[in-house]
Amino acid sequence: MAGSMKAVKLRIKSVQSTMQITKAMQLVAASKLRKAKERADASKPYLETMLGTLTDIANSNTDFQSPFTKAAENEKWLYVVIAGDRGLAGGYNSNLFKFMEQETKGRDNVTVLPIGKKSVEYFKHRNVPLFTEEYAEVAKVNISDCFQVAKLICEAYKSGEFGHIFLCYTNFISMLSQVPTAASLLPLSDLRSEDLKSDGKARDLILYEPDSETVFNAIVPEYLAGILYSSINISYASELAARRTAMEAATDNAEEMIDTLSLYYNRARQASITQEITEIVAGAES
Amino acid sequence: MSSYHLQVVSMDGLDFDGEVQKLLLRTIDGDVEILARHTDYCTAIGMGTARVTMEDGTERKAACIGGMLSVLKGEVKVFPTTWEWSEDIDIERAKAAKAKAEERLSDQLLDKEARVRAEAKLYRALVRLGSTGHQDREK
């Protein structure tokens, strides 16, 4: 009995120290989350209206002079995957990678541009070719980095290195739900709604000034940079929210464990006292 | 004068969402003014002062740099890289940035990339100053 009591006491201590860590991580994530959520909320309208407008433009576009609007020339895919830098964020990273796996099923010419350390590690481990590893730390990526990435992607796309550009990020729905999402970035014809792809319905014409090629050449790098920046902001908020939820659950579990263990410990202690008394009484009577 | 719905969405959030009469801004191809019932239109934005005429006829100015302008089915959307209302611009800071960029550009030994960057900084500072009315255009 005495041996098991000591083991229980040690276990309580170890659970307590784990709880301290999870509690601290929860608080840190919560305080960072407030700022990140503000940024994500500010970025959201840009991402949504921009994608919406470009889908509309792609739907009614009849001009295919610009390399960015032409239908894809080859079946090579570039995925920009935005994950976290660190683990212990519940299913944040693994959900995204699982989603990614489903997305890329049946496509064998996939290259990845990972953003976030976990993303780099994962794709390296799986021997997926990486486009560049320069943007490994998602927390350090700023707006001018986004412009650089956008420029890199544009150049690679124009030279025919890739036929399709996709973006994989985690959308921030609410504090409790974050959903992995993929969006097509280039060519713009990929953005077309499915039902419009086949029918030959007359489209509304758009006036481009000075001409569509110049316009798209000027717009696309900025559009990519903007989309990247806002989706990084949103992903970062998702990561923190996921971490906060996961750590909250872990803290709750630890508390529960401590309760059960101390109950068990107290029972054992009482049992040993009772036994001792019984022994003493028995000794005195004999 | 009839008005239309304008949205200005930059990476920092929704800068404007409401009814306006006119929007004048500088595209890569020169100044363009959008009135109500404009045809579907798409262009890239240059660097310059944007003037927005509100429903009640008052005019607001903003420094607008880069991005795109689209008109689709009467909905006008501006996606600028930066959009700063003239009243939000820190004039002293813009002046300091201008002075600093000019100083850098006067250095003959500056390499090409740094020169391009300094020039871009100078233009941005000039656009900011221009949209607040502090126009001292030596360039």
Image: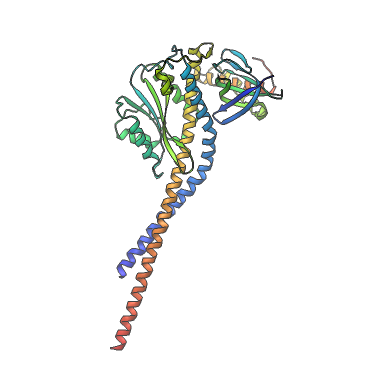
Residue A40 on image: x %, y % = 51, 36
A123 over A194 or under it: above or below: below
When asked about the image quadrant of residue B67, the answer is top right
Q: From what the image shows, is residue A25 above or below residue A81?
A: below
Observer-nearest residue: B82 or B110? B82
Residue A194, given in percent of the width and then of the height, sits at 41, 23
Colour scheme of the picture: rainbow
How many numbered discs sit on the rendered protein? 0
Compared with residue A163, is residue A240 higher up or lower down, i.e. above or below?
A: below
Quarter of image, res B104 = top right
**Which residue sits at x=30%, y=88%?**
A285
* A45 relative to B108, above or below: below
Picture quarter containing residue A192? top left
Residue furthest to the right in view is B57
State the residue at coordinates (49%, 21%): A56
| Residue A58 at x, y percent in the picture | 46, 19
- On the rendered image, what quadrant is the N terminus of chain B found in? top right
Residue B113 appearing in the image: yes
The answer to whether residue A263 is left or right of residue B5 is: left
* Front-lying residue, B6 or A118: B6
The residue sitting at 51% across, 43% down in the picture is A32
Quarter in which the C terminus of chain B is drawn: top right
Farthest residue to the bottom: give it: A286
Q: Residue B54's x, y, as percent?
A: 68, 24
| Left or right, residue B125 beside residue A87 | right
Closer to the camera in the image, B85 or A141: B85
Q: Is residue B98 visible?
A: no
Residue lying at 61% horizontally and 28% vertically, measured from the top left: B17
